[in-house]
Image (tube, rainbow, N blue to C red):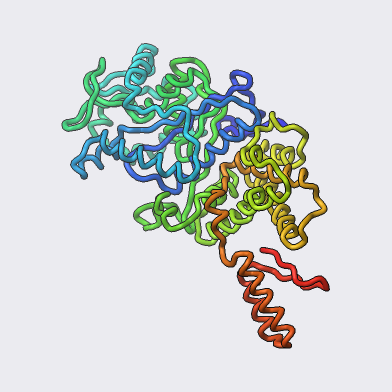
Amino acid sequence: MTLTLYNTLTRRQEPFETVEPGKVKMYYCGVTVYDYCHLGHARACIVWDVVRRYLQFIGYEVRYIQNFTDIDDKILNRAFVEHSSMEAVADRFIKAYFEDMARLGIKEADEYPRATHTMNGIQRLIHELENKGFAYPSDGDVYYAVRQFAEYGKLSGRKLEDMQAGKSDRVNVEDPEYQKKKDPFDFALWKAAKPGEPAWESPWGAGRPGWHIECSAMVRDRLGDTIDIHAGGADLIFPHHENEIAQSEAVTGKPLARYWLHNGMVKVDGEKMSKSLGNFITIRELLDRGVDPMAVRLFVLTAQYRTPIDFTDEAIAAATNGWHTIKEGLLFGQQYGEKLGWDLGIGNIPIPKSQYPVANPYIERFQETVNNDFNFPGGLTVLFELAKELRRKGNILVHEGKTETSPEELQQQWQTLVTLAGVLGLEAEIEAETDKNDGLNDAEIEAKIQQRQEARQAKNFAESDRIRDELQAQGITLIDSRDGTRWHRN
């Protein structure tokens, strides 16, 4: 059961082999902190959070780095509008980021480097590029000479000669920045200071870094010359990740990353999400509407991570229903564990696969499925199977007092569900959920059944049918037998 991943760089699925056996160095291009995070950020952060969790589950030691772009034109524009500062805007939205991610159950990265805290590394990398002939200064700016890097375009599949056609129609030759470049394809590594903007001293004069060089420097400073996984949204393949490769590999002569992984984009009702269309949804707006964060995670994980995903009311409703099913299974131990004589002290935390005491067919099937390019939708099938089986056994326990399945086997099934759900970051709020019931509680259901029984004895079959239909509408099925009436939640 070898883990294989689709590598954007090679355009094929490949066995996963790390630079250092048993260890993974992983970098995710994080957010530019000028606004609240939206559904696209939610998808990316959930996907790479689960990838990290899964790698840890199958035994890897993972060092996971996620950056913040905290200097950018959008940040500066917001600061200007708000009569604030770049630092104040960045700090505010970094704080908001952590609030939103905590609500979604995202584990914090091992480190969150910021561009403004990596200025020495950025300048050092630009200086090395200049010394090697890949960069040149021009009136306070520094540009990367794209044509000097022979492999430019290998990630995106774009060729300079193809991009050249039509580019002249889009270039404003009067643009001062264009006039500073030796070639239209060259991009900025360092930008000369503008009046009123933050600036740092450098060998080329006061200024600030370009966007692409920031990530190259942060990867190198925190993880070294070659990492195992470089992740991000598909919209970053070109030019951002293409330019990272050109910058980093021109200096080191080594691959920047062994595997380039990219998640698909989020649409809303079939259209690209944008403020102009009025379908721009932030994470906090969605969760403040009452959508369960775990339903959001489930919605994201029901699609293959590389494909686009469409956010609709129907899709989130389906994810909410699916989460209710898994949640019932996760709460099985709290509801029935004491009755079954379990030791719950060891039952409600995920267990790494390497620590599982015996071969487990559910875990083996889960891993075999997910090992195929992080097939989390296939892995969810195993969770639903376990959850539905535990729900069925719970209904039998309620109405018959025991099941044919031994308490030990039931505990293993429940622990397996808890473990696999933990890999996907799906966790039930035990205290809140045990005190809460969606609809009627058990005592109210039994009272309704008693009313129905009295109606039947009085030959008031219309009332009997009404009560049965009322319960059915609330997801409760009645089963009449010679021994009385049993019920279960659908």
Up-down relation of residue 3 to residue 401 (above or below): above
Task: Name the residue furthest top.
Answer: 131
Residue drawn where x is 63% and y is 49% of the image: 334
Question: Residue 259, percent across and down?
Answer: 57, 28
Depth order, front residue of 338/314 = 338
Up-down relation of residue 40 to residue 62 (above or below): below
Question: Residue 25, percent across and down?
Answer: 53, 24
Depth order, front residue of 411/144 = 411
- Left or right of 317, for residue 76: left
Q: Is residue 193 visible?
A: yes
Q: Splitting the image into 4 quarters, where does residue 488 fall?
A: bottom right
Up-down relation of residue 488 to residue 424 (above or below): below
Q: Is residue 373 visible?
A: no
The number of numbered badges drawn on the structure is 0
Q: Splitting the image into 4 quarters, where does residue 149 fall?
A: top left
Residue drawn where x is 68% and y is 79% of the image: 452
Task: Name the residue furthest bottom.
Answer: 459
Depth order, front residue of 62/127 = 62
Question: Residue 404, percent across and down?
Answer: 82, 53
Say which quadrant the C terminus sits in.
bottom right
Say which quadrant the N terminus sits in.
top right
Residue drawn where x is 64% and y is 24% of the image: 17
Question: Residue 379, percent across and down?
Answer: 66, 44
- Left or right of 467, for residue 26: left
